[in-house]
Amino acid sequence: MAIDPALREGMLAAVPRLRAFAVSLSGNVDRADDLVQETLVRALTSIDSFRPGTNLAAWLFTILRNHFRSEYRKRRREVEDVDGRHTESLRSQPEQMGHVELAEFREALAKLPPDQREALVLVGASGFSYEEAAEICGCAVGTIKSRLNRARNRLTDLMQIESADDFGPDAATRAILTDRDTGT
Amino acid sequence: MKRRTRMTTRSAKLPEPPSFDPPKALGRDIQAKIGDQLRAMHDDIVKQGVPDRFVQLLSRLDKGEGEE
């Protein structure tokens, strides 16, 4: 197939943001790159359904998100402990920021239900409006807002627990957090 | 399902519109921290740019080879 040069450029320009989103969904850079690759292939295969002049990035995010969701459902049937694995793979990631705090944040984020996590990342990190996030997730704007509220509340709880660590190594807090990961 | 009123701007406009109504009183500092951390995570990946494999993938597809 011949790819329109402007389209090619637009797709490549979206890749860094797509990767960041994919990492937050999958918790793993290698898997994220596979998701992005699959997204680009799918996008080109169904390029006829893209309306020129509309938001290419949002369209690509929609494809990536839907693809991840169907994979996730598949895996969930295969592996019970999807969330636990997600947390594990995040934890084993190198701390590129050299930042304990950020590593803890990743862990907290991994504990959110996928609906809430994607809403938070799309609006809070990827820079989409509520309307765009709703379109990407195939839900109402109000749903995005309520997911954001719940995500922020939950993260706040988790981070308040974790910030107790700021006062020093705190085995009790660690134990609580570890229990939460594996206990249920 | 598509909303015709959708915004096409893809700016970095970020949350906290007036309509945002936290059901709980969230500490402003924690909210700000959540925002900072989200962006830090995001930027961490974004600053890696476009890995070569994606440039190569599009070139390959462009020539009509190697489509999966």
Image: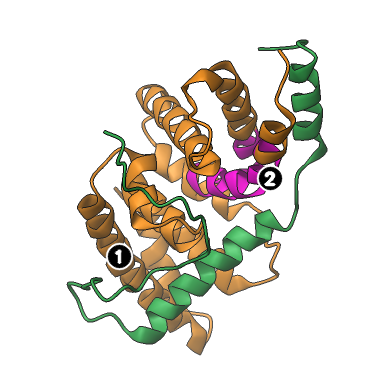
Q: Which chain is rendered orange in the image?
A: A
The disc label shown at residue A154, or none: 1
Q: Residue at x 26, y 41 (%)?
A: A139
SS at circle 2 = helix
- Position of residue B49 measured from the top left corner of the image (x, y, whole percent): 75, 51
| Quadrant position of the N terminus of chain B in the picture | top left
Which of the pair A154/B49 is nearer the observer?
Answer: B49
Task: Tell me: A170 left or right of A30.
Answer: left
Q: Is residue A97 above or below residue A5?
A: below
Look at the numbered disc 1 and give the secondary structure of its residue: helix
Please rate how many residues cluster around mark 1, counting C-alpha atoms within 10 Å: few if below 14, some from 14 to 19, many from 20: some
Magenta residue check for A18: yes
| Chain B painted colour | green
Query: What span is colored magenta in the figure?
Result: A11-33
Q: Nearer the viewer, residue A25 or A49?
A: A49
**Which image quadrant: the C terminus of chain B?**
top right
The image shows residue B60, relative to residue A164, as above or below, that is: above
Quarter holding residue A32 = top right
What residue is shown with label 2? A13
User: Callout 2: residue from which chain?
Assistant: A
> Can see residue A151?
yes
Q: Position of residue A62 (x, y in %)?
A: 44, 36
Kind of residue at badge 2: Ala
